[in-house]
Image (cartoon, helix red, strand yellow):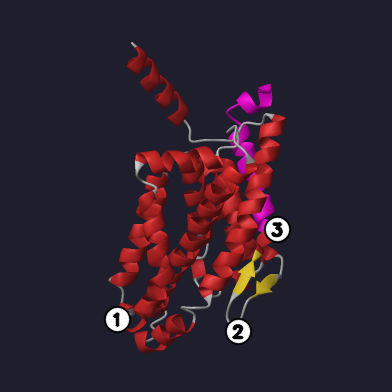
Amino acid sequence: MSQIQKSSAYPWALTGVFAAIHFIITIIPFSISVGIEGVISFGLISAPIIGFLLGPLYGTLAVIIGTTLGMFANPAIGTILGPFTPLAPASAALVAGAIRMGRPQISFLIYLSGTVLFVIGPIFLQAGIFLWLHIIALIISMIFIIPQVGRLLYEGVTPTTESNFTFRILPFLIMAFIAVMTDQLIGSVIGVYYFIYIQLVPAEVIAPFYVSVAFLYPIERIIATFIVAPICILVSKAIKNENLILPTIPYVDRISELGQEESNL
């Protein structure tokens, strides 16, 4: 490990660098069309990758900063969700980072909270079908809070893990899927409350839109999953080969070390 990587400024420097990268990616006017309403932006792809690289704290901050700056540079970015726009990609970064650090409980709680907010929201009775794939994602995230299963996921996405390429494909696909689905869920929930309670758009107008994309957004999210996962696998391999150290959460590693020392006494 180099002296730079040991420095306390190292993760903050990476946060600034990746915030700038995400900013540039966010304002690039390019998307992959998957239907009349469905698009995949570069921001959707970069957020979970940044979360994977920088962890749940620094990765989330980088995405929030980058997205916010992108909204100032291109106001059209915040047209749909207004000032709440950064929360959706930030949630993807948070989930990917949490999974990479072996804390799938965080991703499950975020997903459960988003699902509950949609269920108790004003359009659930009319647009409950919208949640069908999210229910599947919620079940998957719940399975991985089982310690033995969660450990397999953690080992699969850990860059320093000595394992073959085939073993790592599924864990990375799961991480990417949960992350991009969290982005979609949080953005959708924010959209419901923002449009109905802030923009005062009638629920009768919003609900049909959610029904209309219920079988469209899965296409974009699956495509996004198969873009994010291979990139993370390749980056993970490069990190291991170059012996680089990824940021974690301040003090968490030290607390874990102290706990391990106490258990050995």
Q: Which stretch did the figure color magenta?
A: 1-24
Q: Which of marks 1 and 2 is nearer the N terminus?
A: 2
Residue at mark 2: 36
Asked if disc 1 and disc 2 are in contact, CB closer than 8 Å, the reply is no
User: Could you tell me residue 44's position as x and y percent?
Assistant: 59, 62
Mark 2 and mark 3: Cα distance apart in space: 26 Å
Task: Name the front one of labels 1 and 3.
Answer: 1
Q: Earlier in the sequence, mark 1 or mark 3?
A: 3
Q: What residue type is labelled 2?
A: Ile
Mark 1 and mark 3: Cα distance apart in space: 39 Å
Which residue: 63% across, 48% down? 232
Secondary element under disc 2, as helix, strand or loop, is loop
Classify 32 as above or below 146. Answer: below
Residue at mark 3: 24
Mark 1 and mark 2: Cα distance apart in space: 25 Å
Left-right relation of 225 to 249: right
User: Could you tell me residue 94's position as x and y percent?
Assistant: 48, 50
Residue at mark 1: 125
Dot 2 crowding, Cα within 10 Å, few <14, some 14–19, many 20+: few
Q: Is residue 7 magenta?
A: yes
Q: Is residue 241 magenta?
A: no
Residue closer to the observer: 197 or 102? 102
Classify 66 as above or below 115. Answer: above
In which quadrant is the N terminus drawn?
Answer: top right
Q: What residue type is labelled 1?
A: Leu
Q: Earlier in the sequence, mark 2 or mark 3?
A: 3
**In this orientation, does residue 126 appear?**
yes
Residue 69, by quadrant, is bottom right
Q: Is the magenta stretch mostly helix, strand or loop?
A: helix
